[in-house]
Amino acid sequence: MRRMVAPGTSSLPVAARVHGFSYAIRNIVAEAKKVEASGRKVKYLNIGDPIEFGFRTPPHLVEAVARAMRDGHNGYTPSPGIAEAREAVAREFTTRGLPTAADRVILTSGTSEGIELALGALVNEGDDVLVPVPTYPLYTAVLAKIGARTVFYRTDPNRQWLPDLDHLESLVGPRTRALVVIDPNNPTGAVYPAEVRRALIALAERHQFVLLADEVYADLGYDGPTVPLGSLAPDAPIISFSSLSKAYLAPGWRAGWLAVGRSPRMDDVLAAIKKLADGRLCSPGPMQYAITAALTGDRSHQLEFRNALRARAEVTTTRLNAIPGMRCVAPRGAFYAMPQVALPPGRTDQDFVLGLLREAGVLCVYGSGFGTDPAGGFFRVVYLAAPSELAEIYDAIASFASRFLGR
Ligand SMILES: Cc1ncc(COP(=O)(O)O)c(C=O)c1O
């Protein structure tokens, strides 16, 4: 007779790799919920979702998805995506100076899945990937999961948050497999000039590794859309990523794409990505139809959105730089700023951010969540709220900062 085993009470084990996977932008929400439970309202400036702040998805895109569903496009699509949307993406790159064939485009569940597929196809356990610091934290999280090493290259707040090219080159080693470039940048709002972009391409060519060009904010440069990195060198080993999440105001749709550069050196990488993409069947089907609609239809919302963001960036920079002990580089695109406070000795960026949350009800993310030194005093602000609301938030930040910094 089998003996009955009493249900255990101890936790079942989880994989070790999860311990290295950290995503501060969402992790910190648990703290905010505790503050809310104590009866205080919280302003969430932690996540870059324009919908949360009243911006609306263009109606013709909503209609394209609804129509696709009504027309019965509710099954799996081919794993690289539907042909018409892949062609629309390829035309878009080509129009922007990067000749691209539809066959080298893969539709993904947001930029995020593109990043994960590309790193999965390129990087072995123990390999190195060069990632900017501060960085969008998905890169470090995915690399931790793969068991690869994130090698941070500095971007410099004293030089508009541009990459420190000498530092970057000094980090290249025999196991370097890829260089991540986020331009326009989250979390700093930097937009890289052509000479910096050319230098990054030259570096990748010199050392023979792949450039991963995260261009999810390309249409949100305040001086107008930025051109794809690959347009500066169409034969360079570049994979470009973007989505409808930001500039088309549909982050929840998980509608993105990647394009692998045309160089035959990239053929095996493309095949590997396609192989991995087969395993996840496809990205959300009806939303793929919105990609065609987005890239072939009316984009007038983008001008309005950029103007709204520029005005918010202005309020942000002016107000934060007026706070004693704080400085903030003016963002040139997207909707993030990375101010720095002069921390009292022994205090960390987390102390500052948690204090701000608990005492002022404002949730930002500490810089160390993006890879900066905890003693550096950086934190990230998402400035999507209306300018009048931002002004109130910055008042609250100012009065908290004067207490915390003792100024
Ligand atoms: C730099 C960067 N890359 C990728 C993503 C993820 O975007 P998606 O919604 O397209 O997956 C974000 C989202 O905030 C981001 O800031």
Image (spheres, rainbow, N blue to C red):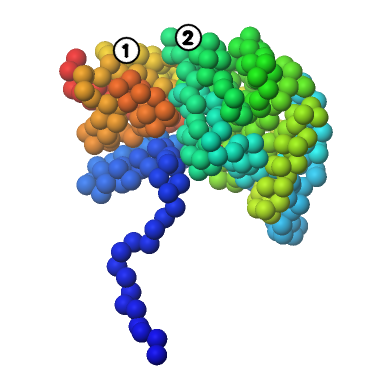
Q: Quadrant of the N terminus?
A: bottom left
Residue type, label 2: Arg
Q: Residues within 10 Å of mark 1 (few under 14, many from 20)?
A: some
In the image, is residue 22 above or below residue 407?
A: below
Q: Is residue 158 rendered to the left or right of residue 91? A: left
Q: Is residue 66 rendered to the left or right of residue 385? A: right
Residue type, label 1: Ala
Residue hosting label 1: 322
Q: Is residue 283 rendered to the left or right of residue 308? A: right
- Camera-nearest residue between 71 and 12: 12
Q: Residue at x 35, y 40 (%)?
A: 28
| SS state under label 1 | loop
Percent from the top left, x then y, of residue 155?
A: 48, 17
Q: Residue at x 40, y 45 (%)?
A: 19
* Residue that sits furthest to the bottom in the current view: 1
Does residue 92 appear in this view?
no
Is the CB of mark 1 within 8 Å of ligand 1? no
The CA span between labels 1 and 2 is 20 Å
Q: Give the mark nearer the N terminus: 1 vs 2.
A: 2
Percent from the top left, x then y, of residue 100?
A: 79, 30
Q: Residues within 10 Å of mark 2 (few under 14, many from 20)?
A: few
* Disc 1 to disc 2: CB gap under 8 Å: no
| SS state under label 2 | helix
- Camera-nearest residue between 387 and 52: 52
In the image, is residue 130 above or below residue 125?
A: above
Q: Residue at x 50, y 33 (%)?
A: 149
Q: Quadrant of the C terminus?
A: top left
Q: Quadrant of residue 72?
A: bottom right
Residue hosting label 2: 159
